[in-house]
Amino acid sequence: MKSYQQHCGLARALDVVGGRWTLLIVRELLLGPRRYSELLENLHGMTTNLLASRLKAMRDDGLIEKSEQAYRLTDRGRELEAVVLALGAWGQPLLSTRKKGHRRNVDWAMISLKRRYDRSLNCCVEIRVENKLYTLNCCPEKLDVTIGRAAAPELLVTLTEEEFFSFFILRNSTSEPTVLGDADLWKKFREAFAV
């Protein structure tokens, strides 16, 4: 990618993360380490050559590292979470209707939950959306979301993909998900995400 050749923090930042797909790769890695094939699957429309090129550039810039066949964000790369969440919040009003051919993905929606969380809880919740598991560690400082089983969840929430989007994202569900755990904690969890 060409440099803006400007001695300005914004310009230098865009030299590193302004390339097409770069912030979307960061979004994918916010949920934890991913294999090359997993990144390629979620980044529909990206060619293998372009992905390889972007990953190399991101490694060279210190945003990601590779270990055991998986890519993960470095501390420097994780600092981009606030940027990704802010851009997602800015773009949210543009999602009033779903355009034909536009894909949706539960992984991406989980990232959006991070910006909606009101930081009022201190608990661990596992959300099961069909055959995929997510661990939500809710803390007063932030919400940490990772793909995979929770070690000791206080709530276990099970939904289909349609139910997940209807309940958590569109907030127009007429039915409750299947929930195992304390009813009072479930009520507080719903309030923490305004669902």
Image (cartoon, grey):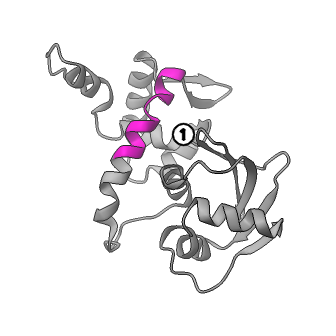
Give the magenta part as a residue range.
Answer: 75-86
Q: Residues within 10 Å of mark 1 (few under 14, many from 20)?
A: many
**Residue 185 drawn above or below residue 72:** below
Q: Quarter of the image for the N terminus: give it.
A: top left
**Majority secondary structure of the magenta segment?**
helix
Residue occupied by mark 1: 30
Secondary structure of the residue carrying numbered label 1: loop
Residue 53: x, y in percent?
A: 38, 29
Residue 162: x, y in percent?
A: 57, 76
- List the single residue furthest toward the bottom: 174
Relative placement, left or right, of 172 versus 127 is left
Relative placement, left or right, of 160 versus 150 is left
Inspect the magenta stretch and tell me whether residue 118 lies in it.
no
In the foreground, 148 or 173: 173
Three-letter code, disc 1: Leu
In the foreground, 110 or 47: 110
Q: Is residue 47 visible?
A: no
Q: How many marks?
A: 1
In the foreground, 131 or 31: 31
Task: Determine which quarter of the picture holds residue 180.
Answer: bottom right
Q: Is residue 56 visible?
A: yes
Residue 51: x, y in percent?
A: 42, 36
At 60% across and 59% down in the image, what residue appears?
Answer: 192
Residue 151: x, y in percent?
A: 84, 45
**Residue 87 drawn above or below residue 16:** below
At 76% across and 62% down in the image, what residue appears?
Answer: 185
At 54% across and 23% down in the image, what residue appears?
Answer: 74
